[in-house]
Image (cartoon, grey):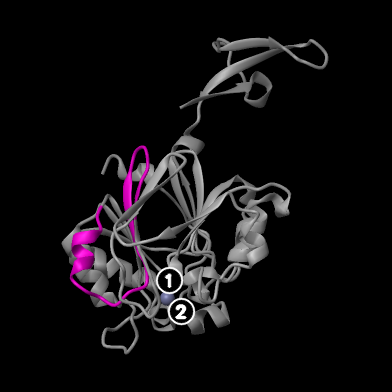
Amino acid sequence: MKRYVTARARKCSRNDTYARVSGCKKCGHRLYYLAVEDTGQAGDTIIFLGTGGARVMVANQLLASGGMWLSLSGTELLLDPGPGCIVQSTKRKLKANKLSGIILSHRHLDHVGDVNVMVEAMASAGFKRHGWLFAPSDALNTEPVIFSYLRDYLEGIQVLEEGKTYTIGNVSFTTPLRHIHPVETYGMVFKTLRHTFSYIVDTRYFDRLLQSYGGELLIINVVFLEEGRPFDHLSVPDARHIIAELKPKVAILTHFGTTMWRARPWEIAQKLTEETGVKVVAARDGMRFDLSQLDNS
Ligand SMILES: [Zn+2]
């Protein structure tokens, strides 16, 4: 994708030929424009605003919580804005009013804690009706996670359902199946202009996960180090099995509970890389992952 910048905005080389010349509307001065490749906007990047998951970690903020900021083919989306999202995103100079939408995988606090403030920020503090909210019906109906007055700030709300596909800007995503988790929960398969990747959010392990997710990149919420805990979350052995079966080019682990954090997620990722033959990365708070690095691997 090409965009145009004034020559002054970029250092000119002598060989530059100007793509456009036009007169400044204010003073008539000549403005020279260069055509540049807009890799930042047209590419696909994911910023991990936080990598902590579940109650104890979120309460202590040993790792930040806040979800993921997706910049996909020029469309910006926010996924699971947990507590701290407004702080983590503004700290990184991410502009909420550039978001086209906010997606909630499920209504648990560590995924929706900052949804209200982020909806307001997306709508330029409420001055401009802007952006979409995607959420399962139980996040919107019985005890809504979003204040009723904020609904008017949105362009609309779309209810997530099993097996449906949603389009926003240059991106589409599918919610292939309902997860096994105490509330209505969906992971996603995202399709951008260049890439396909999956986000396996909170769930107990079950075999249908393997038939539902795929793509070059797999992001997995791994709360527990060991299996057998009485909660509906994935553990390291579950993640090992999923990665070995789905064989993405890269797998990123995130949403760490306390047992994972103590066991050093980056060391676990290294071990999983050796065991599965897939490059496994442990997300870090603030990590920016550029999907273009998948293209030549
Ligand atoms: Zn949950």
Q: Nearer the viewer, residue 266 or 152?
A: 152
The span from disc 2 to disc 1 (Cα, nearest Å) is 8 Å
| In the rendered image, the vertical position of residue 209 relative to residue 233, given as above or below | above
Q: Residue furthest front?
A: 141
Question: Do residues under tags 2 and 1 come within 8 Å of each other at their CB atoms?
Answer: yes
Q: Residue at x 26, y 70 (%)?
A: 239
User: What is the x, y in percent for residue 195?
Assistant: 33, 43
Disc 2 or 1, which lies upstream in sequence?
2
The quadrant the N terminus occupies is: top left
- Looking at the rendering, the stretch of residues picked out in magenta corresponds to 189-214
Mark 2 within 8 Å of ligand 1, using the beta carbon: yes
Q: Position of residue 62 (x, y in %)?
A: 54, 77
Most foreground residue, 111 or 168: 168
Q: Is residue 117 magenta?
A: no
Residue at 36% across / 61% down in the picture? 161
Q: Is residue 49 left or right of residue 242?
A: right
Of the numbered discs in the image, which one, if any, rests on residue 54?
2
**Residue 143 visible, this angle:** yes
- Residue 108, relative to residue 6: is it above or below? below
The residue carrying pointer 2 sits among few (fewer than 14), some (14 to 19) or many (20 or more) residues within 10 Å by Cα, namely many
Camera-nearest residue between 127 and 289? 127
Q: Give the amino acid type for the residue marked by disc 1 in the picture.
A: His
Question: For the residue with label 1, is its CB less than 8 Å from the closest atom of ligand 1?
Answer: no
Quarter of the picture for ligand 1? bottom left
Q: How many marks?
A: 2
- Residue ID for mark 1: 255
Q: Quadrant of the C terminus?
A: top left
Residue 182 percent coordinates (x, y): 38, 80
Q: Vertically, is 168 above or below 29?
A: below
